[in-house]
Amino acid sequence: MTKTLDLAGLGIGPFNLSIAALLQEAPELKTAFFDQKPRFSWHPGMMLPGVRLQTSYLKDLVTGVAPWSPYSFLNYLVQHGRFYPFMNTGMASVSRAEFADYMGWVASRLDNLYFNRVVERVQFDGDHFLIRFAGEAEPVTARNLCLGTGKTPHIPEACQAAAGDHCFHNMELALRQPDVSGQRVTVVGGGQSGAEVVLSLLQGDWGRPRAITWFSRRSNFEPLDETPFTNEYFTPQYVDTFHGLPEDRRLTLVAQQKLASDGISPVTLEALHQRLYEHHVADGGSPAVSLQPDRTVESMSADRPFRLETVNGLDGTRESSKADRVILCTGFESRLPAYLDDDLRQRLDTDSDGQLRLGPDFEARWDGPIDRRIYAVNAGRHSHGIAEPQMSLMCWRSARIINHLSDQVLFPVTASVNMVDWTAVQKESDRPTETHQTDSHQAARHESEMGATSNTI
Ligand SMILES: Cc1cc2nc3c(=O)[nH]c(=O)nc-3n(C[C@H](O)[C@H](O)[C@H](O)COP(=O)(O)OP(=O)(O)OC[C@H]3O[C@@H](n4cnc5c(N)ncnc54)[C@H](O)[C@@H]3O)c2cc1C
């Protein structure tokens, strides 16, 4: 790769894959995406039996902005001869395994992806970004970057000394395939992953444990809110409105809207509750199962059997329990990637939490040349809201980035139908001379003048 790229994408998870797929429509741009893995895979460590997508299959890599693209989930079904049987299943959600296979199929058809490339260091030489890979002497040069290397599994401080073969993050679970027969297994974390792990344990997916204990800091095992007006948070209009709010207001809203993005799918809760009921009826209470919401793990011994000290938020009591194995379903941290060179890192504008401050088109604010952009995906929860880590607006974000990069409206990114007027200034007709709106609103206006079609998310 001798020529300078217009865009280097670092990481090939779903989010950068979506950008790579849509970039097939802009062949004049020289782009390449790099990943450390040997081939595309999607969270293989959490590919548990029966797990399903939490979003519609129509919110795939491309459809929301380019329904004509050959890289849609529907085209994947057609090419695999499964369109009619799939429709006849009547399934509201697809399995994560099928969606991962779809994304792998797309990845296998793109010519701008490079696997087995570990990004070790990224520098800026004043004109170009230099991307250095493990084991390669020559860097790749690029005018623009898109950071898409995902998030880091979070291990709570109390559990760090115990972390190892018997206490690990759920992202390693399916890769480790632990034998839990006869063991006391504790699951920490009351979100979707925690629920899926408990369900798998109850099904005996890794043997029959002696006991299952499930701790959640939340006051109950709380559902993902999938109702229509909550889903309006996952629309371009809301995200643009959110982006225009003051930073402190945005952070408050992200905390308030937790269950819109971070609860347990109602279908998983139902399956879990039914499985528990059947367990009590049929299995006579073995393994012993204890669901303990409102518990914070305060400390944990480093050696087995692990001794966990918890505080019960309901009545303030301190409790103690033992476990042979602990599975930490404790979420992820968003950090600046370690491969960013110190000089480059210092030139980036970050908020009080160390998160990148992103412009409306997902471009990081930095003090470099205006025509050298660092885009970031899955990094904008504070700037763009709770939709950011989800796939709901994945292809819309990709379209925003590509339109911005190419300085053209290659994809429609505005909606003409507003179900909710989030602010008075949102209505186009009401704000012909609005001054504080972002570049994206100007682009949006430009687009509607050009007769761009509406987004149908
Ligand atoms: C188990 C699970 C299920 C989820 N299910 C849903 C769902 O149903 N619906 C939904 O909307 N969202 C879901 N999400 C949230 C979100 O959609 C996913 O986490 C999604 O994978 C995020 O994509 P990404 O591209 O940002 O990152 P990732 O998928 O994490 O990909 C990052 C990539 O970067 C690569 N990488 C990292 N460091 C380097 C390096 N130094 N050099 C080269 N490559 C590197 C990694 O190998 C990886 O391939 C789920 C998340 C999880 C964890």
Image (spheres, helix red, strand yellow):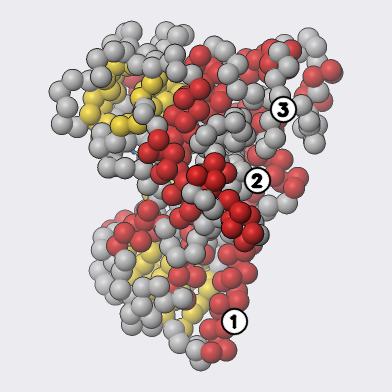
Label 3 crowd bin: few (<14), some (14–19), many (20+), radius 10 Å: some
x, y percentage for residue 219? 60, 63
Q: What residue sits right under mark 3 in the picture?
A: 454
In the depicted view, which residue is nearer to us: 408 or 280?
408
Give how far across and how far down residue 178 sits, in percent.
31, 69
Q: Quadrant of the C terminus?
A: top right
Residue type (three-letter) at the residue carrying disc 2: Gln
Q: Is 327 or 120 nearer to us in this picture?
A: 120
**Up-down: is 192 above or below 319?**
above
Amino acid beneath label 1: Tyr
Q: Provide the residue designation for mark 1.
A: 277
Verify CB contact (< 8 Å) between mark 1 and mark 2. Answer: no
Q: Position of residue 20 (x, y in %)?
A: 44, 29
Q: Secondary structure under badge 2?
A: helix
The correct choice, above or below, for 127 with respect to 21 in the image is: above
Image-quarter location of ligand 1? top left
Q: Residue at x 36, y 67 (%)?
A: 326
Q: Position of residue 391 (x, y in %)?
A: 55, 42
In screen coordinates, is 412 left or right of 36? right
The residue pinned by badge 2 equals 256
Q: Nearer the viewer, residue 451 or 225?
A: 451
Mark 3 secondary-structure assignment? loop
